[in-house]
Each structure stands twice: as C-alpha cells, then as structure tokens.
Image (tube, rainbow, N blue to C red):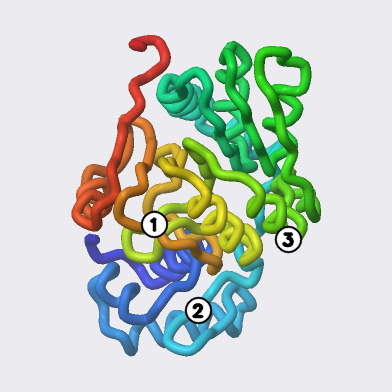
Amino acid sequence: MSAIGSKARRDRIVQLATTTGLTSVEELSQLFGVTASTIRRDLARLTTDGRLARTYGGAMALSAHPEASLRQRTGEAYDAKRAIARWAAAQVQPGETLLLDAGSTVGALAHELRTAKDVTIATTGLTALQELADVETVHVECLGGTLRPLSQGFVGPLTEAALERLTFDRVFLGTDGVSPEHGICEADLRQTRLKELMARRADHVYVLAHAAKLGRRPFHAWATLPEGWTLVTDDTADPGILAELRARGVATVLAEPVGTL
C-alpha cells in the first residue's frame, strides 16, 4: 500500500477493525508500510478519541461488529446467492434426505427446492420452513430449539438432540465469513458448534458463501473448514483465497450467474 497521511491511516484502521475483526499491530505495520511504533501511536490516539478499544497486541472496534439481521442480509448479493442456490439445488437427487442451515443463502436454496420431488428436508432455519411449508412433494422436519431472532435459526441442546436422531445425504451450511486459516465464522459459539455437529451427520458437506464473505472475520466464533468439504461461491471470488482453500483440501465451486445456467 502506498504511503498515506496519518489521519487517513487512522481512519483506515478503524474501518478495518470494524469490518474484519481484531486488528493486530504486526498486520497493520505490514499493511501500511510503517513501523510498529507508529501503529501503536495511532492506536493510542484512536483509543483516546474513543474510536477503538485496545487489546493485547492490537485493537478492536468498540461496536464489536454488530450482527446484521436476516432481513437486512436477504437483499445483499442477491444475484450471487441465486446462482449459488441453483447450483446447490442441482446436486440434490430424488429420494435424498437433506439438512439445511439457517441464513439467507441457504434460504435461497430452500426456494429453489420448492420444485423438488421425493426429498426429505430437515432444517434449523425459519426461512427454509417458510419456503417449504406449503410444498406437498417435500417432507419437512423442523429441528427446533432456542430461536436466535437475528439469524432466524434454532440453536442449543434441543436442536443438537434432534440431530442425533437423523442422518443426511447432504448438508448445506451458511456462514458470516470464510477464512482458509480459521474456517467458517459466526456471531455465536452455539452456531459454530451446531454447524460442526450438522456436518458430522451428513455424507456430503457444502458451505454456501458469496464472494464478499471470503477473507472476512467479522466475529470471533469459528468452526473448522476441513478437508473434504465443498465451498460454493460465485465467480467474483478472490482467486488467492480459493487457492489457499484448495491447498487445504477444501473443494471449491464457482456458481455461474443465473442467466448463463
């Protein structure tokens, strides 16, 4: 990154802390091409001004990455989510039993599955339930539990207990962020634990995430993204991140825009 003024640099630090998560002195020093001492002075100034909160080795946003509601997220990356959903729906075979996560992209998949025949779909998400409630050709199971209003999904011990009664041909997971190093990110540890349990019950595991989520670290709760899973994203995804994922044994699919399918 070319040299920028101290005020512009501090503004950029606040933006990074707000959008990507915890910001370290080392990372910022490398990013801006300045010394660690300069970054520490920036962080001290931003803390004094009430714009950041200091942590050991770095800083984080005071607002701690507020989680957007499902309603807010539904309209984001609409075309990409449709493309991902259509690709995912095309993998489903008659007679299969599926598990759908909560989230807007998985909700788009549920919409595509309204025309499915002879399938059973279990879900932890209200969006999928609403999409499939009146579809007579799909058998629907609700894995109830504690409802998280922001995500419109069920979590907790009741949901986990229900999972133990079923196995699945395919599970489709949503996420708030994807990191080759850390895995898939959520706002709540109950969500990441649930995703790992869901994956253990299925033969094939897919993570549905549009390109803007790749490389994002909006929260600090993670589930692993192990070898053998498949990430389904759109054709604007960062090639470098995709290469890192493939090097770790994660299959990657770029869903083509809906108009080209």
**SS for tag 3?**
loop
Which of the 4 quarters of the picture holds residue 109?
A: top right
Q: Earlier in the sequence, mark 3 or mark 1?
A: 3
Disc 3 versus disc 1: distance between alpha carbons?
A: 21 Å
Going by the image, does 74 lie left or right of 44? right
Q: Nearer the viewer, residue 3 or 169?
A: 169
Looking at the rendered image, the quarter that the N terminus falls into is bottom left
Residue at the (28%, 69%) spot, across then down: 32
Image height check: is 23 above or below 202?
Answer: below
**SS for tag 1?**
loop
Q: Which amino acid type is marked by label 3?
A: Gly
Give the number of the disc on residue 156: 3
Percent from the top left, x then y, of residue 181?
33, 64
Q: Earlier in the sequence, mark 3 or mark 2?
A: 2
Residue at the (71%, 57%) spot, across then down: 161
Percent from the top left, x then y, of residue 68?
66, 48
Image height check: is 35 above or below 127?
Answer: below
Looking at the rendered image, the quarter that the C terminus falls into is top left
Q: Nearer the viewer, residue 103 or 4?
A: 103
* Residue topped by disc 2: 59
**SS for tag 2?**
strand
Q: Which amino acid type is marked by label 2?
A: Ala
* Residue topped by disc 1: 225
- Label 1 Cα crowd, 10 Å radius (few <14 / some 14-19 / many 20+): many
